[in-house]
């Protein structure tokens, strides 16, 4: 895991090094650079040493030095690819996955990325063709940002490095995205002119002609198989889960794992211990002291004891939030989708004190259909099918009768259900899921009336994604949006909160083979009777403690901001959101915000949204 920065065109070397050093937290171990002979190209790299500690310094060249690469990420099947490449005559001078990429590019060209299993963002300078070839992994685990202007093409692992050469301006379209979805869609960022390379895309920059070309090499396809043998589907999933964890444990430095006590992290910990046999690993857990609804450590300890891990725990307090949240948003580059980045930041800090690589359960909810909103959305389909007598006319994943046993999982989500059913009941599926994903209703009263947000335009963008040709099942439409878009906001947090401490985070559930296996499975099987994580539970039932599988109190690392905002953090919220600068900005309804903070009204997700946004302005747009 590392930080990369490159600029092609007009630049100053010292300024480029300053931009690179803004990524020193991503790669604290060593740095390297390549400057072309005509001084028209700079490639810089900050290294976090994980594989081949002694000779893996980047940039790395091919045999005749006609090609050079800078790389952030990890190719987990690099040993197998290296063996194949040696058979083709390639000679290696390191034992790194980085060198495997550049030889794979020599051998197979741009198609090489289809052979990789891993997470990556890299750039290869091909001097024979005078071009830059860049790529980002299939699911977007690793970030890649770029700016293409008249005088130069710039790319980096984080936006802050690009801002050394580009004046920050707000992108109003991306702001609309953020206010509705609490993330920006497609290639947009909140900075005008700065884009992100989308997951599953390659980018080629022709240096002579200054021409940029993007090509999609992978997407989430629902090529649904007719396979109905559930045991065979589960057996294949078991194999893929074990193999994904196995290859993600390739490392020349100590590994550990996040452990919340939920099914996802518990599964990763369990499979890790089975892979390592008698070798103990460190596990890392965080908690709050504001009540049981903010503390999962009972379950985390249970799993730790089951698998004999070295258990590490951190207690998080309001003072930690107040002292760190500005810095966290700086690391994020853009405002975050939820306050969960705060505990994740500190658990990553805890992990970095013991290990350099940590495994986690990110992606489990999107792949295995674990969110409560999926059950809420499908409950409406069941009601509709029962009322209109259409439940048997199509292959529903559940009917009103079969979904009932799973409804007890919604015990903690009654406010969500009330809000969801308040308006638009039985409208088309696209509008209904948009309602579940639309955060604007939470934030509307807190925004200035002068701020124009086009809900129609945002719905049209959502509709184009949700009704993508080839996705006919309601569950598949939901899964596509969440894997392709919602997951990006979570992976941004995963990357920044770990890399802030020089910690490599690996996410075994996001092995593309697992994604393709689940997306090819019939919806009636993968979301049978509306049961969240049905296939995952059955795949790990004989490994994970039954108490974890039977849990009904899904938490997702909730933060007690509702409590803190009325007590220890009241002054902090007022100082940030009611400041002179914030009022002059004119984006927020200061009187509504003041009323929300000072009254007994419950803290809303919307208040987090405006806080995160204001801290973003403070960090990047206020000079």
Image (tube, rainbow, N blue to C red):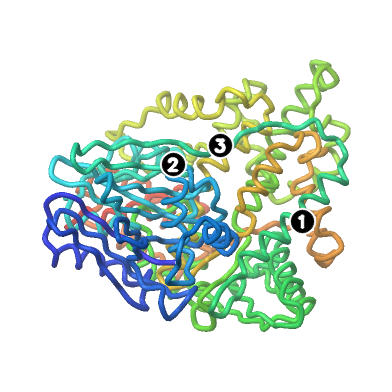
Answer yes or no: do the residues labelled 1 and 3 have beta carbons within 8 Å? Answer: no
Q: Is 623 above or below relative to 445?
A: below
**Nearest to N terminus: mark 2 or mark 3:** 2
Depth check, front residue: 380 or 591: 380
Residue 481 numbered mark, or none: 3
Residue 515 numbered mark, or none: none
Residue 41 in percent (x, y) is at: 19, 55
What residue sits 40% from the left and 64% below the top?
570
In the figure, residue 500 lies in which quadrant? bottom left
Residue 63 in percent (x, y) is at: 36, 62
What residue sits 72% from the left and 76% below the top?
276
Specify whether 318 is left or right of 397. Answer: left
Q: Quadrant of the N terminus?
A: bottom left
For residue 599, say whether it is visible.
no
Depth check, front residue: 160 or 610: 160
Q: To which residue does mark 1 refer? A: 239
Q: To which residue does mark 2 refer? A: 201
């Amino acid at each position: 895991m590392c930080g990369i920065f490159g600029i092609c065109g007009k630049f100053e070397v010292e300024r480029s090094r300053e931009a690179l050093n803004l990524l020193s937290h991503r790669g604290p171990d060593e740095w390297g650079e390549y400057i072309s002979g005509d001084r028209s190209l700079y490639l810089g790299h900050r290294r976090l040493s994980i594989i081949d500690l002694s000779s893996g310094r980047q940039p790395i060249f091919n045999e005749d030095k006609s090609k050079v690469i800078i790389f952030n990420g990890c190719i987990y099947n690099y040993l197998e690819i290296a063996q194949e490449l040696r058979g083709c005559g390639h000679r290696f001078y390191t034992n790194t996955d980085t060198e495997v990429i550049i030889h794979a590019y020599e051998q197979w060209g741009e198609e090489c990325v289809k052979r990789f299993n891993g997470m990556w963002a890299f750039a290869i300078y091909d001097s024979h063709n005078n071009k830059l070839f860049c790529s980002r992994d299939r699911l977007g685990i690793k970030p890649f940002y770029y700016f293409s202007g008249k005088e130069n093409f710039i790319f980096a692992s984080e936006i802050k490095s690009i801002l050394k050469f580009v004046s920050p301006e707000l992108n109003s379209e991306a702001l609309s995205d953020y206010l509705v979805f609490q993330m920006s869609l497609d290639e947009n960022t909140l900075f005008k002119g700065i884009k992100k390379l989308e997951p599953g895309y390659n980018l080629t920059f022709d240096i002579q002609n200054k021409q940029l070309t993007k090509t999609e090499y992978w997407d989430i396809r629902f090529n649904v198989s007719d396979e109905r043998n559930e045991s065979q589907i589960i057996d294949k999933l078991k194999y893929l889960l074990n193999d994904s964890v196995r290859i993600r444990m390739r490392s020349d430095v100590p590994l550990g794992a996040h452990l919340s006590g939920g099914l996802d992290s518990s599964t990763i910990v369990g499979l890790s211990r089975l892979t390592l046999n008698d070798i103990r690993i460190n596990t890392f857990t965080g908690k709050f002291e504001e009540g049981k609804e903010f503390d999962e450590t009972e379950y985390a300890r249970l799993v730790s004891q089951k698998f004999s891990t070295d258990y590490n725990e951190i207690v998080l307090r309001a003072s930690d939030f107040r002292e760190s949240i500005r810095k966290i948003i700086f690391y994020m580059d853009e405002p975050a989708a939820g306050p969960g980045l705060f505990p994740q930041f500190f658990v990553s800090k805890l992990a970095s004190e013991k290990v350099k690589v940590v495994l986690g359960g990110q992606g489990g909810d999107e792949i295995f259909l674990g969110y409560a909103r999926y059950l809420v959305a499908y409950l409406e389909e069941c009601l509709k099918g029962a009322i209109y007598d259409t439940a048997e006319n199509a292959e529903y994943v559940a009917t009103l009768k079969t979904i009932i046993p799973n409804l007890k999982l919604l015990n903690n989500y009654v406010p969500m259900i009330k809000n969801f059913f308040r308006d638009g009941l039985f409208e088309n599926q696209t509008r209904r899921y948009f309602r579940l994903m639309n955060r604007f209703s939470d934030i509307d009263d807190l925004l200035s009336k002068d701020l124009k947000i086009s809900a129609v335009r945002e719905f049209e963008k959502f509709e184009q994604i949700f009704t993508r040709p080839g996705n006919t099942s309601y569950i598949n439409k939901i899964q596509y949006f969440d894997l392709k878009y919602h997951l990006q906001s979570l992976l941004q947090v995963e990357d920044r909160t770990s890399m802030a401490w020089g910690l490599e985070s690996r996410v075994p559930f996001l092995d593309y083979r697992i994604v393709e296996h689940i997306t090819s499975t019939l919806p009636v099987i993968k979301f049978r009777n509306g049961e969240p994580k049905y296939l995952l539970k059955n795949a790990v039932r004989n490994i994970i403690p039954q108490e974890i599988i039977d849990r009904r109190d899904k938490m997702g690392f909730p933060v007690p901001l509702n409590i803190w905002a009325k007590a220890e953090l009241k002054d902090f919220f007022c100082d940030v959101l009611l400041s002179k600068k914030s009022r002059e900005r004119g984006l927020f309804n200061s009187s509504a915000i003041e009323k929300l903070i000072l009254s007994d009204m419950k803290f809303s997700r919307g208040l987090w949204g405006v806080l995160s946004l204001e801290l973003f302005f403070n960090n990047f747009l206020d000079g």
